[in-house]
Amino acid sequence: MPPEAPMPVYDFQYWISDAWDPMEYGREYDFSQPFFEQIKELYAAVPWAMMWAEGRINSDYSMSAWVKNCYLCFDSGFSEDSAYSVSLQRSKQCFDVINTKFSELCSNSINISHSFKTFFSRNCVSCNEVWFSQDCVGCSNCFGCTGLRNKNYYIFNEPFTKEAYHEKLAGMGLDSWTGIKNARQEAETLWLKYPVKFQHSVQAQGSTGDYLFNVSRLRNCFFSDGTQDCAHSQSIIYSPIKDCMDVTSSGEAIELCYEAVASGLNMAKTFFSFDIVTATNAQYAINCRNVNNVFGCVGLRKKEYCIFNKQYSKEEYHALVSKIIKHMHDMPYTDTNGRIYGYGEFFPPEMSPFGYNTTQGQEYFPLTEEDARTQGFPWKASETKHYSTTRSSQSLPDSINETGDEILNEVINCLHAEDNDHPWDCESNCATAFKITAQELAFYRQMQLPLPRACFHCRHFERVAWRNKPALYQRTCQCEGAQSSNEAYQNQTVHNHGTNPCPNEFETSYAPDQAEIIYCESCYQNEVI
């Protein structure tokens, strides 16, 4: 919670103990006030602890559960010895990754799974020792490639012998910052010369959205794995998840849920709730654990038949809930923008203690302060940061092999801050400075990777820019028969539409102004499978 948030903040171990009782904050429902005014008061009164902190070992600075030796890992679980990552699952020794699962010794990548030693890559599955590659499956020892399947020893989509491959990579200077910059620029240039499939998906039956894997009958969903019969949801990657709508960042084993955020693990019939674990028939619940049949409660654990943190009998509970729902329709809440909130609406955004610019919302749908406030979102004022830096990022050793242990004592200027007269105004919320930890220095040396030049925030937003926004556009396949419509790519096979332009239309997250060549699934498979 930010320091300006009204609610008290407890240490997590104290918060989960019996040393305090959230029921002491219980109150009668007041039919003279709108529901959302009352829940806002309760929300501000009940103590909080760090979200999703169960099972952490030596990972105090991570908002993650069941992790060990992790530093600055967020929305992650069942991982070890990792740092600077978001949505890292069941992985080990991974640094600076996003949406990565079942992987080890990976770095600077996004949307990868079941991979080993995969660096500066995106949308790769089951890859081993792959660099600067995208959309590769089952590949080993590939560099700067796109759209390959089960290939070994390829550089920029061209085959090499094993000996020639390693000789070529040795001359690229990948242990240096200069070598990494040059390789990335060359790889990204090559990627634009090959088609990509309209949707990042594997076995996505009857589904619309993007980044869909082993799913069926999804509508407008993003970042989903093992999910079925859901709509308008994202970051639902822990199967089984089914029959849900408007769910974001869920845990595993949830069903029949609606408008639930950062909730999950054995949850059913839970509506309009936030940060809930193991719940059934919960409505307008916040930060609760192991609850059943609760309405408008905050911070409860192992309770049932409660309203506003007050205990009722089963009969009293159901009777009062019916009256409250009617009251929410009869006396709705009006926010500062004049919007009406009755039963069936999620919490008004003005209740949030977080500024919009400090949340993932800014990553997916960036807004200016003016636009955010117009839409009723809180905004965190920029902070001028005054770190006593001891080293310029531009003066760091070019190669990891030139880096001594003394770097652990340096406070380094973020490269973004050095290039910007007002770094605290940048959209990535630049920290302006950073340090190298002993854990990451050991990793860079093991993997022969150069030191980063930017702070964690700027590095994170640089990776975020590698993925499409969660929005869909109606487009037509860019296959013109023998080549792509921009003439950058010559087809390698004859497609079923022959020399005529492909007529297939689809919804895709690739915006019309993006430079990628977008093929429908049939045309794409003709080229890469």
Image (spheres, rainbow, N blue to C red):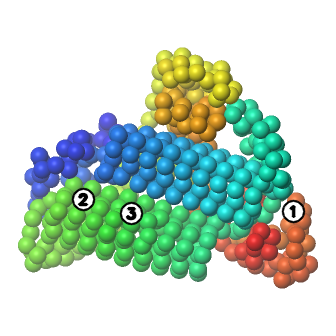
Q: Residue at x 57, y 59 (%)?
A: 113
Task: Identify the residue at image location x=26%, y=62%.
Answer: 285
Q: How many marks?
A: 3
Residue ID for mark 2? 288
- Residue 168 point in image, percent of width and height: 82, 43
Which label belongs to residue 481?
none
Q: Amino acid at mark 3?
A: Gly
Q: Nearer the viewer, mark 2 or mark 3?
A: 3
Instruction: Please name the residue shown 39% across and 66% down the image.
Output: 252
The quarter of the picture where the C terminus appears is bottom right
For the residue pair 370 and 422, the one nearer the viewer reads as 422
Q: Which residue is mark 3?
A: 251
In the depicted view, which residue is nearer to us: 49 or 53?
53
Residue denoted by label 1: 489
Task: Choose the circle earlier in sequence order: 1 or 3.
Answer: 3
Which image quarter is the N terminus in?
A: top left
Taking depth in this image into account, of 294 and 436 the one nearest to the observer is: 436
On the picture, is 162 further left or further right than 385?
A: right
Quadrant in which residue 112 is drawn:
bottom right
Residue furthest to the bottom: 496
Check the image and report above or below for 475 versus 352. below
